Amino acid sequence: MTAFILVGGMFTGGWIWEETAARLAETGVRAHPVELTGLGTRRAEAGPGTDLETHVADVLRVIDAIPAGAAPDLVLVGHDYGVHPALAAADRRADRVARLVYLDAGPARDGAPALAAVPDRALREKAADAGGNGRGGTLEPPAAAAEWRCWGSTAGLSEPLLDRLTRLAAPQPLGTLLQPLRLTGAVAEVPAAGVLCTAGGAGIDMLQMQVGLGDPALTALADRGATFFELPTGHWPMLSLPAGLAAALLSAAGGGGRRLSPPSGELPPHLRPFLVADRDLPVVPRERTGAVDLYVPGGDGSRGARPAVVFVHGGPVPAGARPTPRDWPAFTGYARLAAGQGLVAATVDHRLHGTGDHALAAQDVAAALERVRADPRVDGDRLALWFFSGGGLLCADWLQAPPPWLRCTALTYPLLAPPPAWPVPGDRFRPADAVGGAGSLPVVLTRAGREDPGFAATVEGFLAAARRCGAHVDVIDVPDGRHGFETLDHTESARAAVHQAVRTVRAHLTR
């Protein structure tokens, strides 16, 4: 006696659930797509006062129309923006809703508008500007199939499906995006599940990593025992993979799926000891100025200016994560190793807190480089940049037109192409495209043999582009290493790879 209430995302109406609802009906359960005011068949009903509360009321009407005895198990599904009215409705009918499902949607927060969950900063600003001081007006949907990529991965959508999505899309009432979500807290007692569309770049392992980094919303879901599913498709699985989505929803209704591990007494992977024992690392004083830490061999510069290497952490790292990356054992370990090789080492905290923050992070890295180059103990004509993980996208700025003082770029288990759902602006932050401008700049690339397949594919694409343009790439392999092997895999091959990478970077800096 389960009934599904399906709440669509931005620009869409109840029509988008047709195939998924049919698959659910084949199993004997009922599905109730919600027609939200101003969208779908109710496109003409939007007015100046249409806001998030209007859509919450739409969902509540559907819940209240289902007799309690007819369907004791109501599963409320919110896709994308739809999780905001779904969450608010579940909060007000916590006694009726058996489970809340986040469908390729980020956690929503009490007091925050739905607009805050839009990852693309430019789209957020566009909507905020359109809204002005009030909540009237609308945000126009994509006018062409290619424009949907700004809102999520279109993987799995055929040309006819994209055309249909474009043709039936309706303007989103701005009040629904700008009015803050209001929760009483009752929804915290409602079991939750999440369905992730992995073509957009996010999988369960990535969420688990974010829990380890202290993401408060995901930590709360882990503490509540939320379960998660993955679908190998883009942001609109009700169109691209309706059977798979229906199966995931049915399993979620029964409590299936994979749980995230809540924080425990054990150290999370990024805070575990560096693979080179502390006693084997040189003792180098650390100097902290703003967001930059310097490790200077000899300290006073009495041996003259030295080459320097700037380590750039990956991400996204939640803004509230403590300690910050420059205090993580991997980065303090690399910095001390580099200083032991006679280099000035610098670590920097940057603002890659979300998938749309690469431009902010790039500003921070550029400022850190200027700070390091200006230090009299640094040879400003001999610097290296070393990027890790999701920070790998930032290397594109430096590959496409490297300044003469940049003598080497290093990449360790990097992400070298943005996942489709990441709101990376224009053609920036695409290393495979940028490497053609690298010229003679050497690249030192360390690969983890047990890498996430999505990350590994971007590395192979980058190497193929480098071969085509004749770029110089030194590849160092860690066959048994995982992403973050410096604190996960204390093996001889991993240690040897770290030492080899540091020596190779030093060799390029001292030529």
Image: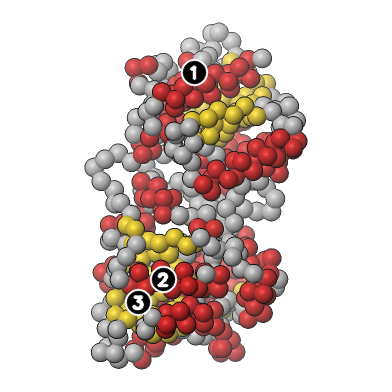
Q: Where on the picture, by quarter, is residue 276?
A: top left
In the rendered view, would you say 208 is above or below 60? above
Front tag of 2 and 3? 2
Residue sitting at x 58%, y 22%: 505
**Which residue ends up furthest to the front in the rendered image?**
26
Give the left or right position of residue 394, taking residue 189 as reference. right
Q: Amino acid at mark 1?
A: Ala
Residue sitting at x 38%, y 50%: 208
* Near-viewer residue (368 or 411): 411
In the rendered view, would you say 210 is above or below 3? above
Label 2 close to label 3 by CB (< 8 Å)? no
Residue sitting at x 49%, y 18%: 339
The label on residue 247 is 2
Residue 389, image x, y percentages: 51, 40
* First in sequence: mark 3 vs mark 1: 3
Give the CA distance from mark 2 to mark 3. 14 Å
Give the left or right position of residue 456, taking residue 470 as reference. left
- Report how many numbered discs are placed on residues in the image: 3
Q: Amino acid at mark 3?
A: Val
Front tag of 3 and 1? 3
* First in sequence: mark 1 vs mark 2: 2
Secondary structure under tag 2 reads helix
**Residue on which disc 1 sits:** 339
Residue 254, image x, y percentages: 30, 71
Give the CA distance from mark 3 to mark 1. 57 Å
**Residue on which disc 3 sits:** 75
